[in-house]
Image (cartoon, helix red, strand yellow):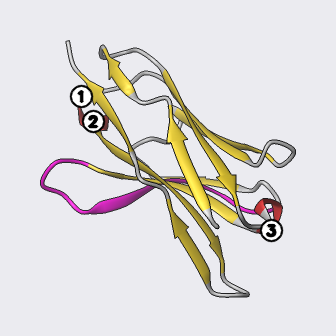
Amino acid sequence: QVQLVESGGGLVQPGGSLRLSCAASGFTFSTYAMSWYRQAPGKGRELAAHITSLAGTTYAASVNGRFTISRDNAKNTVYLQMNSLKFEDTAVYYCNARNDYIKANYWGQGTQVTVSS
């Protein structure tokens, strides 16, 4: 059974930091590209950060230079380090696993990040 379990969300002040984790199970983690998406209230889901199976990374312009995505294949976990958080980073953050060769696409349940003073 495939599972993606996010953790690490919470309430943080502007300028603060959070580290999200996504623990994966039920599939061959190292062969999947992993991403963090986010969905703010009243808006669509958008890609925040992406890491390939070979650890190449890409970021949305809005988070570039502040967020860092990484993966630990030994722990089947992907991380999102978020620094210099802004009010507009408030959203539910979702973990995504994708393998285009076998057309597999999985989502976690999401974790809430709220940036507020």
> Disc 2 or 3, which lies upstream in sequence?
3
Which secondary structure, mark 1? helix
Residue 110 screen position, x and y as percent:
40, 48
According to the picture, the residue beneath numbered tag 2 turns out to be 90
* Label 3: how many Cα within 10 Å (few below 14, some 14–19, many 20+): some
Q: Amino acid at mark 2?
A: Thr
Which secondary structure, mark 2? loop
The answer to which quarter of the image holds residue 91 is: top left
Between the C-alphas of marks 1 and 2, the distance is 6 Å
* Label 1: how many Cα within 10 Å (few below 14, some 14–19, many 20+): some
> Disc 3 or 1, which lies upstream in sequence?
3
Q: Is 96 placed left or right of 32 in the picture?
A: left
Q: Amino acid at mark 3?
A: Thr
Q: Which residues are magenta?
A: 40-53
Q: Residue at x 24, y 28 (%)?
A: 87
According to the picture, the residue beneath numbered tag 3 turns out to be 31
Q: Amino acid at mark 1?
A: Phe
Instruction: Give the camera-side residue of 74 and 91.
Output: 74
According to the picture, the residue beneath numbered tag 1 turns out to be 87
Q: Tell me whether the residue at label 1 lies in contact with that at label 2, contact meaning CB atoms closer than 8 angstroms.
A: yes
Quarter of the image for the N terminus: give it: bottom right
Quarter of the image for the C terminus: give it: top left
Q: Residue at x 71, y 87 (%)?
A: 102
Residue 86 screen position, x and y as percent:
30, 27
